[in-house]
């Protein structure tokens, strides 16, 4: 098909880019290939979108194209949304049709109990439910239900085991962990509208180019560089 032909061409281009990888494993930055300061116009966001391998979103722009890592991009979008929720102290919650019961060790139950006020600010409704048990009555309105148990369990592990050198407070650890675990995963197929919404939300972020842990969310390839490849 036409789309398969386009994808094959871009896969070949990505293979060529492997030669530009440095020690860090990211593509070497230059004036033609850069993860910083992409100029994205509203008209660019109305253009064509192509998803590669269920992982990357290719968006042509007025000066080349941008390759977005969908998981990293969504993580940054959620991180800024959750951070804003704390600033505004208000987040819409969707009531759970089937409340989820959680059972923890005494140590983890104490930690979760300390986190409940912050979880409420993020849109989670978690309440004590007997000894070392809790029930999830609701989750943030814009998140898909069904992963409440595994998400909260992973968040607790993250908060306990964040590298000490980062010196993050418990709230910042919670925000980062929630953003990471709720982000769209690599391998998930997205519709054009989902890709468009993600790109628009990403470039509305105050820092669209990096995740909280400083992984790149996109790379920009300028048209001059593309012309050099094929010349």
Image (tube, helix red, strand yellow):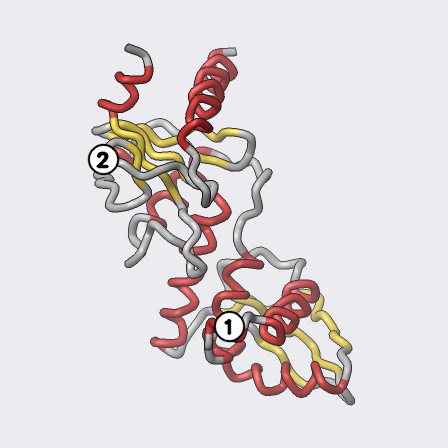
- Mark 2: secondary structure: loop
Residue 106 relative to residue 186: left or right: right
Q: Quadrant of residue 49?
A: top left
Q: Quadrant of residue 58?
A: top left
Sort mark 2 into few (<14), some (14-19) or many (20+) by Cα contacts within 10 Å.
Answer: few
Front residue (pair 31, 74): 31
Name the residue at 30% across, 34% down.
33
Front residue (pair 154, 20): 20
Please provide percent x and percent y for residue 71.
50, 47
The C terminus lies in quadrant: top left
Identify the residue under disc 2: 31
Relative vertical location of residue 32 with respect to residue 110 in this rendering, above or below: above
Sort mark 1 into few (<14), some (14-19) or many (20+) by Cα contacts within 10 Å.
Answer: some
Residue 140 relative to residue 91: left or right: right
Identify the residue under disc 1: 173
Residue 33 relative to residue 55: left or right: left
Q: Select label 2 or label 1 by which is in front.
A: 2
Name the residue at 38% across, 62% down.
80
Please provide percent x and percent y for residue 27.
40, 37
């Amino acid at each position: 098909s036409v789309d398969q032909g386009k994808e094959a061409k871009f896969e070949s281009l990505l293979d060529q880019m492997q030669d530009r990888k440095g020690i860090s494993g990211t593509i070497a930055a230059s004036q033609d290939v850069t993860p910083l300061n992409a100029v994205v116009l509203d008209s660019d966001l109305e253009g064509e979108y192509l998803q590669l391998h269920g992982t990357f979103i290719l968006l042509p722009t007025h000066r080349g194209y941008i390759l977005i890592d969908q998981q990293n991009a969504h993580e940054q979008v959620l991180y800024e949304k959750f951070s804003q929720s704390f600033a505004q102290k208000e987040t819409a919650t969707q009531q759970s049709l089937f409340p989820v019961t959680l059972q923890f060790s005494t140590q983890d139950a104490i930690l979760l109990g300390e986190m409940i006020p912050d979880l409420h600010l993020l849109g989670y409704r978690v309440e004590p439910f007997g000894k070392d048990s809790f029930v999830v009555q609701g989750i943030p309105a814009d998140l898909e239900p069904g992963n409440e148990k595994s998400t909260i369990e992973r968040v607790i592990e993250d908060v306990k085991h964040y590298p000490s050198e980062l010196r993050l407070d418990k709230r910042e650890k919670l925000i980062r962990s929630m953003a990471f675990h709720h982000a769209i995963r690599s391998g998930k197929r997205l519709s054009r509208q989902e890709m468009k919404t993600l790109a628009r939300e990403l470039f509305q972020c105050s820092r669209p180019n990096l995740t909280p842990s400083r992984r790149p969310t996109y790379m920009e390839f300028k048209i001059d560089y593309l012309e050099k490849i094929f010349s």
